[in-house]
């Protein structure tokens, strides 16, 4: 299994910590590994500001506010498109607000790196079909998976 993670940083306010891109790639890989995905895969990750993610949230979800992360899965009912050139399954797009990640890291008392890993894992699970919007068992299942993946990465997760 290999994961091609295309990362684009549109975040201009601060320089990202060294190793952020590697951490995102490791987070994507760990998610697929612990989910038992053994096919080659591709995912696009964009790092941006609160201002830009707010525009996307309004455009795609009709919610007029910023958010920490957006997920745009390319699968329908677990069926993924395949890149004809590489044969890899195309998971979709992840958009992370670095402004939100900075604020949440401070709020929860952990590092920016840990917050970016959490948001990446959270969004990867959305790309794989998990949802927490309705709460209950689905949310608990997703939170447990996030905790397991972050533990595998050597990062602890705060309890919600």
Image (cartoon, rainbow, N blue to C red):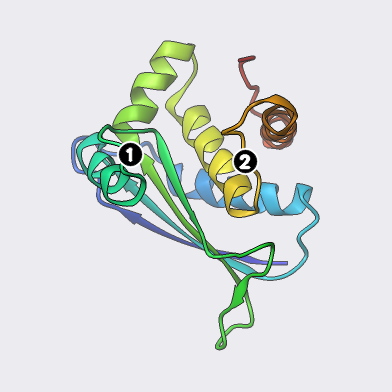
Q: Position of residue 37 (x, y in %)?
A: 76, 60
Q: CA distance from mark 2 to mark 1?
A: 29 Å
> Could you tell whether 104 is left or right of 81 in the image?
left
Q: Residue furthest bottom?
A: 85
Query: N-terminal of the two: label 2 or label 1?
Result: 1
Above/below status of 32 relative to 125? below
> Could you tell whether 100 is left or right of 152 in the image?
left
Query: 159 or 105: nearer the eye?
Result: 159
Q: Position of residue 22 (x, y in %)?
A: 51, 49
Kindly identify which residue carries mark 2: 131
Q: Position of residue 143 (x, y in %)?
A: 68, 29
Which quarter of the rendered picture does the C terminus lie within?
top right
Label placed on residue 16: 1
Q: Which marked residue is nearer to the observer: mark 2 or mark 1? A: 2
Count of numbered badges drawn on the protein: 2
- Which residue is painted at 65% across and 54% down in the image? 128
Under circle 1, the secondary element is loop
Above/below status of 80 relative to 57? below
Number of residues whose C-alpha sits closer than 10 Å to that of mark 1, classed few (under 14), some (14–19) or many (20 or more) = some
Query: 22 or 51: nearer the eye?
Result: 51
Q: Residue furthest right?
A: 36
Under circle 2, the secondary element is loop
Which quarter of the rendered picture does the N terminus lie within?
bottom right
- Which residue is painted at 49% across and 17% down in the image? 110
- Which residue is painted at 66% across and 66% down in the image? 2
- Which residue is painted at 62% across and 41% down in the image? 131
- Residue 27: which quarter of the image? top right
Q: Position of residue 106 (x, y in %)?
A: 39, 14
Query: 67 or 109: nearer the eye?
Result: 67
Label placed on residue 78: none
Query: 88 or 152: nearer the eye?
Result: 88
Number of residues whose C-alpha sits closer than 10 Å to that of mark 2, classed few (under 14), some (14–19) or many (20 or more) = some
């Amino acid at each position: 299994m290999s994961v091609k993670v295309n990362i684009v940083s549109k975040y201009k306010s601060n320089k990202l910590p060294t190793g952020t891109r590697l951490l995102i790639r490791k987070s994507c890989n760990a998610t697929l590994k612990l989910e038992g995905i053994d096919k080659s895969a591709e995912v696009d990750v964009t790092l941006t500001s609160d201002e830009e993610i707010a525009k996307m949230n309004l455009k795609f979800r009709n919610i007029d506010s910023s958010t920490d992360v957006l997920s745009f899965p390319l699968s329908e009912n677990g069926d993924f498109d395949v890149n004809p050139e590489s044969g890899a399954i195309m998971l979709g797009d992840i958009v992370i607000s670095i402004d939100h990640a900075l604020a949440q890291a401070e709020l929860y008392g952990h590092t920016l790196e840990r917050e970016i890993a959490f948001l990446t894992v959270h969004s990867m699970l959305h790309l794989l079909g998990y949802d927490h919007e309705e709460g209950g068992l689905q949310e608990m299942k997703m939170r447990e998976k996030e905790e397991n993946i972050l533990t595998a990465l050597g990062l602890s997760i705060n309890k919600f």
